[in-house]
Image: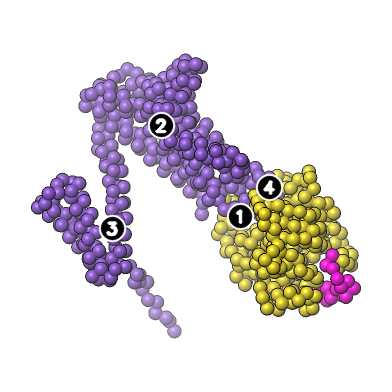
Amino acid sequence: MSTVIPTPKKPWQPTALDKLEDFLLVVAAFGVAGASVKFTGLDGKIGFFFSLFFSLLLLNYGFHYYKRGTAAAKDSLLQVFTVMAIVITCIPIASIVGTVVIKGYKGIHWGILTNDMALNSVNDPVAQGGLGHALVGTIIMVGLALIISFPIGVLTALYLTEIRGPLARPIRFLVQAMSGVPSIVAGLFILSSLVYPVTQQLSGLMGSLALTILMIPTIARTAEEMLLLIPNELREAGVALGGTQWRTVAGVVLPAAKSGLVTAIILGIARIIGETAPLLLVSGGGDALNVNPTQGAMGSLPYYIWKSFLTGGTPEAFARAWGGMLVLLSFIFILFGLARYLSGRKVA
Amino acid sequence: MSNSTGFNDNERDENKMKTAQTTPTSLSSVASARTLSQPGTALLGTGLETRSVHAWFGKKHVLSDVTLDFAAGTVTALIGPSGCGKSTFIRTLNRMHEFIPTAAMAGEVLLDGKDIYAPGTDVTKIRLRVGMVFQKPNPFPSMTIGENVLSGLKLAQIKKSNTDELLESCLTRAGLWNEVKDRLGEHGGSLSGGQQQRLCIARSLAVEPQVLLMDEPCSALDPGSTFRIEETIAELAKSMTIVIVTHNMQQAARVSDYTAFFLSDGGPGEMIEAAPTSRIFSSPQDKRTEDYVTGRFG
């Protein structure tokens, strides 16, 4: 005797008719929006967008009210709002990435990553020179800043969440206030406290110190949030096994927060990798490859972009700038993808 | 594997009845009588004793004047309604109480005759000797099953040469070895709730405590897992002193040699009565104990 096994179904999903209705509603909204732009005072893309938004709201509300009553109508309103919010969020991102790719690929050529600008001006043909020096400078300065800020930031977060000392409240306030420091102020601080009185020359190290000031609050705050998510039971279990507080934090709490700490690193890098102003002040803008962070001006990608835009003025210079942006953007994507992959790999 | 479970209660009860006859009043005298009658338990130390333990959270007095002895090699159940101070009391026994910032206490807790709250005592050493299993299974998420069992060695920085043997013996004693021996490299989170709790028991065994505190170890588990844990407790009781907080009176009756009943009448929790388990359930001295164990309140 064999049981007939039925085909798996998903009766809770929208039917074809539901989908058609939703599609027709959107088409109708586009129609209304188009008509209102054509026949009323509304004009241009913004006018179209606004009338599209309101007609979607009205049509959805009316249709679902007619079909299933007030509760369903309100539900559909919220859906329209969330979808619109996603669209509004995505438009600038898509526009930026799209523009950078479309305009930037013209500035890409063989050797862009290996050549520097020591013997070229920004107005030279795009195929000459490159941004190798800028990429190396960015990697060195961001890397140094990360090496300095990560331990300081995480230790600060540990003070706030694990030790919870008497200074926790003022320090938390200070860290929050520091995350609002304008980047140029960080640059000026290093310039006046270290560059003029001590080193008396621009260097990559000074640049990374300025970036460190910007990076520590981001890492400390993110790490604090992540450590607060670790359940207290794990700390109790570690201590109950005879671990000291330090062994428990190092052996249990930090490993449990690993992917959160990677997020802290990503947000920290994201905070500083595009910074131009402090680097202009303290690391200068080298045009030649310089791998020694303690001596001499060091280039960086944001500086390369800034210089190509402002000092050139020719189509070649603009192509160079867009190419630099494409390289910077791709670099960030690769870095973040790698970090996510490495942090998520071992967790089940 | 242990076949001795709640089922060998008869034997235990007989034992208890005998001692109960000779020493009718206080648990401490009963306990010591029983200890003396069992040769070999001296290896386990002389057990754990509390002297007038009080506990506070902030200004709130939550536990008042508990004097109770846990003889080496016995299982003692702490029962009572929610909020009566059982969990607070058990956490004073290995100094986990102070982990809560507002906590305060008074009195003495003697481990082998020495006060664990005496100035200069190394708290991590105390917690090594008095292990703890918590209400919710809490395996370390970043570690594999094997690493979880041995984590205590790493945390307390104990050097052990033959960790494979220790791993197997801890998991065997916790009744988990057969289920996980082929998946020691998997993460602890991949186990079921009951298995996770036995993993936590195995973890606390690895540092070889002489006392094991269990704070409602089965309250988050299904009956099958609860049964397995009770088997494990019966097995462990041969080699260590166990104190278990439980809401389940049948469980207390099944696993324990002695039972202490706690109650709070709105004020701080107090210990009402402590006696051999069979006597607490058959002929309690205090009316309130009788009302509680017969299910009239609680």
A112 over A224 or under it: above or below: above
What's the residue at 66%, 45% (across, down)?
A245
Name the secondary structure under disc 1. Answer: helix
Is the residue at mark 2 from the same chain as the one at mark 4? Answer: yes
The chain to which mark 1 is attached is A
Q: Residue A243 carries which label?
A: 4
The chain to which mark 2 is attached is A
Closer to the chain start, of discs 4 and 1, is 1
Residue type at mark 2 is Pro
Q: Name the residue under label 2.
A: A182
Foreground tag (2 vs 4)? 2
Q: Quadrant of the C terminus of chain B?
A: bottom right
Instruction: Give the residue at the far left of this rendering.
Output: A39
A23 over A205 or under it: above or below: below
| Quarter occupied by residue B297 | bottom right
Q: Quadrant of the N terminus of chain B?
A: bottom right
Q: Name the residue under label 3.
A: A80
Q: In this view, does A329 lie to the left or right of A46?
A: right
What's the residue at 30%, 56% (across, down)?
A81
Task: Point out the stretch of residues depicted in magenta.
Answer: B11-28
B268, A331: nearer the viewer: B268
Foreground tag (4 vs 1)? 1
Does the magenta run of residues contain B20? yes
Q: Name the residue under label 1.
A: A233
What's the residue at 40%, 25% (across, down)?
A279
Q: Is the magenta region chiefly helix, strand or loop? A: helix
Distance from disc 1 to disc 2, alpha carbons, whole Å, reads 40 Å
Residue type at mark 4 is Gly
